[in-house]
Image (tube, helix red, strand yellow):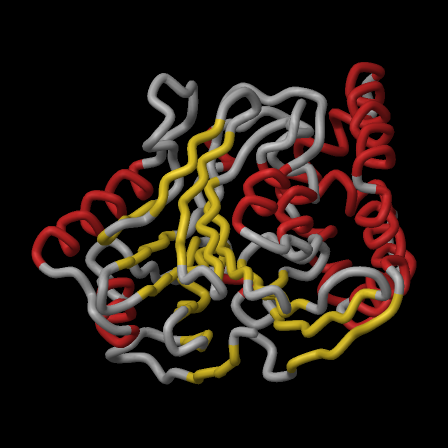
Amino acid sequence: MTSQRHHISGNHREIGRQLGDRYAGEIRKIIAAHPELNRKMRPCYSTPEGRRRYDAFLDIHRHIYPDYVMELQGMADGAGCDFRDLFMLNLRGEYLPFDTDDASGGCSTCSVATPACRLIGHNEDAAALYRDVLFIADIAPENGPPFTTLTYPGTLCGNAAGWNSHGIFFTVNITAPRHVRIGPGRYFAARSLLEARSLDDAVARITGPRRASGFNYTVASRTDCRIINVEVTAGAFHVREIDGAYFHTNHYIELPGTDQMITESSRRRLEHGRAHLARSIPENADALRTLLGDDSAIYRRADTPEETATLMTILCDLVSRTVTIHTGHPVDEPSRQLHFRLP
């Protein structure tokens, strides 16, 4: 993660342009090296069917999410890259159906809601090459609530974790449903969570009609001191109020019968997380971080830039109204902490 915390304001195109300009080199490197973009999306676009699919996605996003399309256009302008490449990268889960190459990543989230605490812990896992480019931005849109977001260069804000001035905090876990369709993409829905004013508003934003695919979201309200887990596919969704402790990885648990890819890593992390919770429910942020630091299955290390690694651990305490981001393993790696106040 970069050491700087960036403060950005303006209309949507200006926000995108500032992000693109600041991370131009990283964005261009990601585009040049991105395996799915170069091996699958661009070749697909070069076919008549792939071009029709792209045009249909672009039309629907210009209609439903015009502001976020403008953010991507501004980002492309600022980075000096092709808008089409950025748009396809932000439809990673929809432009092409998932296959085994697309589901090796994924994060782990543990939520705790007891009389003593309200906690969310999240391991942000991705290719190790992102370790030093994932960044934090404080953004004040011209229209809409200010928010803070953990963001990957080249993607819309919201595709990891974030919180806004209404006290809404959320994290995202990738899922791999095999059924996708033309419709609003999940990166765009996650971006809209940064504008949510309540838990009900958040659920409405991520379960809108004709959605193309789905995610797993953990969403909390500091005002209500509540946490919910939301699973979303193209055709169904499930909302679970957290009561006790709950662990989630990268496949659907609450929507039985979903045709999906389930990796061995996702299964294993879920099993180990549930086993930890069966033995002891974390009562504070330190205990939750220790659980997420279990490197026998949950915390992920990487020997090469292409392998999946735990880039950082994010801890949200609704009672103390704090968000802490840790880099490094809690025991044997140098760690840097960033502290934030939840509005």
Question: Residue 111 is drawn in which quadrant?
Answer: bottom left
Q: Position of residue 312 (x, y in %)?
A: 44, 68
Q: Position of residue 260 (x, y in %)?
A: 42, 24
Q: Where's the C terminus, which quadrant?
A: bottom right
Residue 118 sits above or below residue 155 on the image: below
Q: Where's the N terminus, which quadrant?
A: bottom right
Residue 338 falls left or right of residue 297 = right
Q: Residue furthest front?
A: 224
Residue at the image position 80 percent from the left and 41 percent from the top: 65
Residue 340 falls left or right of residue 290 = right
Residue 301 falls left or right of residue 217 = left
Q: Mark yes or no: residue 76 visible.
A: yes
Question: Residue 315 is drawn in which quadrant?
Answer: bottom left
Residue at the image position 28 percent from the left and 58 percent from the top: 112
Q: Residue furthest left?
A: 279
Q: Position of residue 98 (x, y in %)?
A: 54, 28
Residue at the image position 41 percent from the left and 44 percent from the top: 229
Q: How many marks?
A: 0
Q: Position of residue 58 (x, y in %)?
A: 84, 32
Residue at the image position 50 percent from the left and 32 percent from the top: 232
Q: Mark yes or no: residue 78 visible.
A: no
Residue 78 sits above or below residue 240 on the image: below
Residue 282 sits above or below residue 86 on the image: below
